[in-house]
Amino acid sequence: MQAAVALRMLRQAFRDAELASADLDARLLVEHLGGVDALSLIREPDRPLSEAQVQALADAQRRRLRGEPVHRILGFRAFHGLHLTLSKETLEPRPDTEVLVDAILPFLGERAEKKGAARVLDLGTGTGAIALALLSEVPALSAVGVDISPDALETAKRNAHINGMGGRFEALLSDWFSRVSGSFDAIVSNPPYIPHAALPLLDREVADHDPLRALDGGDDGLQAYRIIARDAGAYLDEDGRIAVEIGWDQQEQVRALFEASGFWWINTVHDLSGHDRVMLFSQDDRQAG
Ligand SMILES: C[S@@+](CC[C@H](N)C(=O)[O-])C[C@H]1O[C@@H](n2cnc3c(N)ncnc32)[C@H](O)[C@@H]1O
């Protein structure tokens, strides 16, 4: 079968099933499982696929139509320009989380330049997405990525190596701060923040394929923020910063938790849909919003 024919068939099957991202999903699958990039699909539409590639695409089509997200099928996702492999216990990193990376990046860049080196702690690192994106932008930065899942930490380590940053990334098995030591210029986190009772309401593609431990934020969704706000001060440099991703309606509660622990709110950054998504805090009032 020719690549362009495979693409047309897959696209039609996904459109018939009313998948929201039918065209994009079909293209991603044909590009990666058929081994053809976007340009060759246009320049060489007659390029034949091997028997194994046709089989892989048929299998992918079945999985996608059963509701498996396209990046789970591919086993990787692009994040902030990095290629990140996924595994059973890693959350699929989302474009909204790139907002957190961009929000803390100028601060870490400046710190690293001023001091010659800087350190960041990523709590609940998953694939390593946030830490690795920061490392890729700031060569003098090193990172500790904490997770409670050994599977996620293996994946984060693999991602650090694949992206050429293995020497600057430490994967640490820890229940939040329990095994963390030392002090950091910044603490970043995209913790689980879905209130327990809201889990059954999640989109099936999320609920069935992202790990529960990456989603469940306890009774009110704020369990992890409570711990981070309570303990972060002991691991943050005096003039350090905190950046946390939040649920769209959690700004007031998260702000209150951090302020009660003596942190100063700097600002809240919106995601790509205009929702409150990332909050920045500092240890001193000079940067306060
Ligand atoms: C929402 S995911 C974020 C993953 C990644 N940072 C990202 O943004 O794509 C939350 C992560 O926190 C981890 N986690 C949950 N409970 C934890 C705990 N008690 N201590 C450390 N990590 C935990 C989960 O395993 C998961 O990897």
Image (spheres, rainbow, N blue to C red):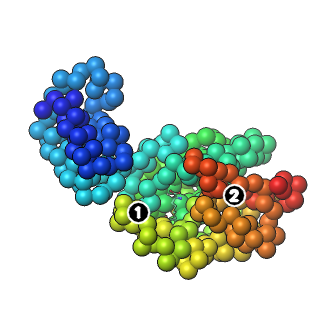
Pick the residue in front: 203 or 187: 203
The spot of residue 130 in percent (x, y) is 56, 52
Q: Of callouts 1 and 2, which one flags the residue occurring earlier in the amino acid sequence? A: 1
Query: Which residue of the protein is positioned furthest toward the top in this rendering?
Result: 43
Query: In the visual, does 61 lie left or right of 203?
Result: left
Query: Can you say which quadrant of the picture contains the C terminus?
Result: bottom right
The spot of residue 246 in percent (x, y) is 61, 62
| Quarter of the image where one finds residue 67 | bottom left
Question: What amino acid type is highlighted by mark number 1?
Answer: Asp
Q: In the rendered image, which residue does mark 2 sit on?
A: 279
Image height of 200 relative to 106, above or below: below
Q: CA distance from mark 1 to mark 2?
A: 25 Å
Query: Which residue of the protein is positioned furthest toward the bottom in this rendering?
Result: 219
Q: In the rendered image, which residue does mark 1 sit on?
A: 203
Badge 1 marks a residue whose secondary structure is loop
Is residue 141 something one can see in this rendering?
Answer: no
Check disc 1: other Cα within 10 Å, few if <14, some if 14-19, many if 20+.
Answer: few
Badge 2 marks a residue whose secondary structure is strand
| Quarter of the image where one finds residue 243 | bottom right
Question: What amino acid type is highlighted by mark number 2?
Answer: Met
